[in-house]
Image: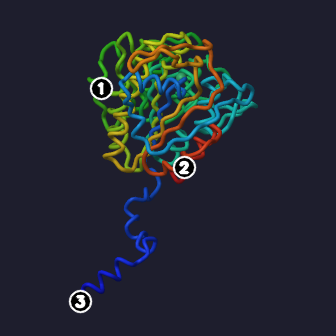
Amino acid sequence: MKYFIIFLLLATVPSNWVQPSTSKTEEPSGKAKNIVLLIGDGMGLSQISGALYNQGNRISLERFPVVGFQKTYSLNNLVTDSAASATAMATGTKTNNSAIGVDGNEKPLKSILEEAEEKGLATGLIATSSIVHATPAAFVAHQTMRGMYEQIAGDFLKTEIDLFIGGGKQYFDRRTSDDRDLIEELRKRNYLIYDYFNHEIQQVKPSLDKNLAYFTADNQPIPAYQGRDYLPIASQIALEYLDKKNDKGFFVMIEGSQIDWMCHANQSPPLLAELKDFDRTIKKVLDFARKDGETLVIVTADHETGGFAINPGSKMKHLETAFTTNGHTATMVPVFAYGPQAELFEGIYENTEIYFKMREAFGF
Ligand code: MG
Ligand code: ZN
């Protein structure tokens, strides 16, 4: 009888009264130790839908519990370019199209990557374009024009970035604006350097007492539909390396650069190949984050490209696609978040908020 009364008492306790002790373990408690920002250049909602249906109604983005939208317009144009939008996400400031890490008055802006460096975290950049191209450039460089590739390469030497992987080797070692060999300079600054000519990505063996650079092309890497497949494995190598290298945490930006280019070209099968490559990369990152438990993963785009559409007559795995332009569009783009502080990314907000939300997630 005594036990029955205790049972009755427990059963009648209001549910909100017992909740605090049970929900404690479910709350994504503290700050994010690590942040992985994945940018699908030009990847709007239609591109994501295209990838989903092309892959038989399955995509890694379905594993993300939090979804938001960002407004992509730049300081001087409703239709942004990748330089202004990457600068907005990297630094929290809207700037003019073509500007890399500087504001509308050409004043340099500190990026989240540079702040992470200052706080003693490990940092990295990975792209399927040249590493001096607009999107990765905005996280380390400060130049008024995105086409200043040799100057942008020079800016890599002004940082302590732990890892970078991408094309653009020629802007480091065969420069026209000066005689510097930045590859030699990087070696002197404790970088272990690999390039595509001598090593496959699988042969890259990071050393924890050195920084790491892997050049995947002299200029632009080939597209995915022609066989480029390094992004998922490069991302995995980078996450394991950055995680071991530094116990304070890390920030890394990983870009699916050529989604944008296939949309500019209005080429649907090559676009779907880029999206598949990016989806494989997202899966690798999510698998790492799930095991790690302290990694915030954000997937978004810098803008939509092509005004991509999935038209009537489409079937699962057989899409009837169309484009409205060979340029960018001003449509909002989705933001997906997973891990500690993911809930910050709910709602509709400016692209500059990505920066402030990342800072808050880190506790900067
Ligand atoms: Mg880009
Ligand atoms: Zn573009």
Classify mark 2: residues with Cα within 10 Å, few (<14), some (14-19) or many (20+): some
* Secondary structure of the residue carrying numbered label 3: loop
Where does the image place residue 275, in percent across and percent down from the top left? 43, 22
* Circle nearer the viewer, 3 or 2: 3
Q: Are marks 1 and 3 in contact (CB under 8 Å)?
A: no
Judged from the image, the quadrant occupied by ligand 1 is top right
Amino acid found under the numbered disc labelled 3: Met
* Secondary structure of the residue carrying numbered label 2: helix
Q: Which circle's residue, 1 or 2, is located before the other in the chain?
A: 1
Amino acid found under the numbered disc labelled 1: Val
Q: Is residue 7 left or right of residue 225?
A: left
**Residue at image location 59% in from the left, 19% down from the top:** 307
Q: Are marks 1 and 2 in contact (CB under 8 Å)?
A: no
Q: Which circle's residue, 3 or 2, is located before the other in the chain?
A: 3
Where does the image place residue 28, in percent across and percent down from the top left? 43, 56
Q: Which residue is mark 3?
A: 1
* Secondary structure of the residue carrying numbered label 1: loop
Where does the image place residue 308, in percent across and percent down from the top left? 55, 18
Q: Which circle's residue, 1 or 3, is located before the other in the chain?
A: 3
Q: Which residue is mark 1?
A: 204
Q: How many labels sit on residues?
A: 3
Q: Which residue is mark 2?
A: 344
**Ligand 1 has an atom within 8 Å of the beta carbon of the residue at disc 3:** no
Q: CA distance from mark 1 to mark 2?
A: 36 Å
